[in-house]
Image (spheres, rainbow, N blue to C red):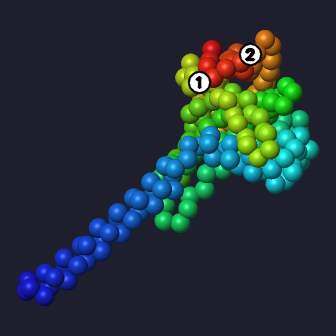
Amino acid sequence: MNRSSLRRLHSQNIRVAAALMGTLLLFSVGCGNARPIDRWQKRLTAFIVHQGHKDPSVLRESAELRSPQSLRPSQIRFSEIDIAGPGIPPFVTMRDVHGVLLGQEKDRFFFLLGVVRRPQNGRMQVEDLRLAACTLHGEVHQCRLSAPDPQALEQYLSADATNPSVIHRTFPMLDDNFRLEVRGGLAVARDERSAAVWRISLHDASLASR
């Protein structure tokens, strides 16, 4: 191989390396800047501010936020769907967040949030469940989250252990039956089907999930 050919090969290698670095950088920027629940909170804030004119009751009035297929018409959901941007390689895993509105207490809205891991080529899996207490003052939206609770997550998922086809699936399921109780500065969410429980303190910055 002569010197001219070596130069051309070296130049091609540099371009390929630069392209690969660009792809990895795009992956890092596109998927690493915001956690899934942070994205969900920002979308919720934008919806209430712009669609509801800062009135959170728009969540109860919007038909498009209700569960699809009308099988659970009373269940109100708010979701943030993770969409792969241009240049994101096909092996990247997306994470969607689905929030089920459990109730309201004064100016707080309570959601049970499910983070669903969605490989572009593979089965979906529920990988996190959190109780969230959200308030909106002006255009400042704050959500207090329960701490990660792998035990409650496993208990929720294991309720379908007799039916392997629905294990590690999306959230929520049609047969979920959530209950919310707010008493003495403590919010407690319970799934009647699995008996999984999530708790969150409303008094201070301390969070508890069980």
Q: Position of residue 200 (x, y in %)?
A: 68, 20
Mark 1 neighbour density, 10 Å: few (under 14) some (14–19) many (20 or more): some
Residue drawn at x 30%, y 74% as measured from the top left: 15
Q: Is residue 165 visible?
A: no
**Type of amino acid under label 2:** Leu
Q: Quadrant of the N terminus?
A: bottom left
* Residue at the spot 41% in from the left edge and 63% down from the top edge: 23
Give me the C-alpha separation between circle 2 and circle 1. 14 Å
Q: Which residue is mark 2?
A: 186
Amino acid type for the residue under numbered disc 1: Ala
The residue carrying mark 1 is 147
| Residue sitting at the far front | 138
Element class at badge 1: loop
Which residue occupies the foreground of this view, 151 or 38?
38
Q: Count the numbered circles shown.
A: 2
Tell me which numbered mark, 2 or 1, is placed earlier along the sequence: 1
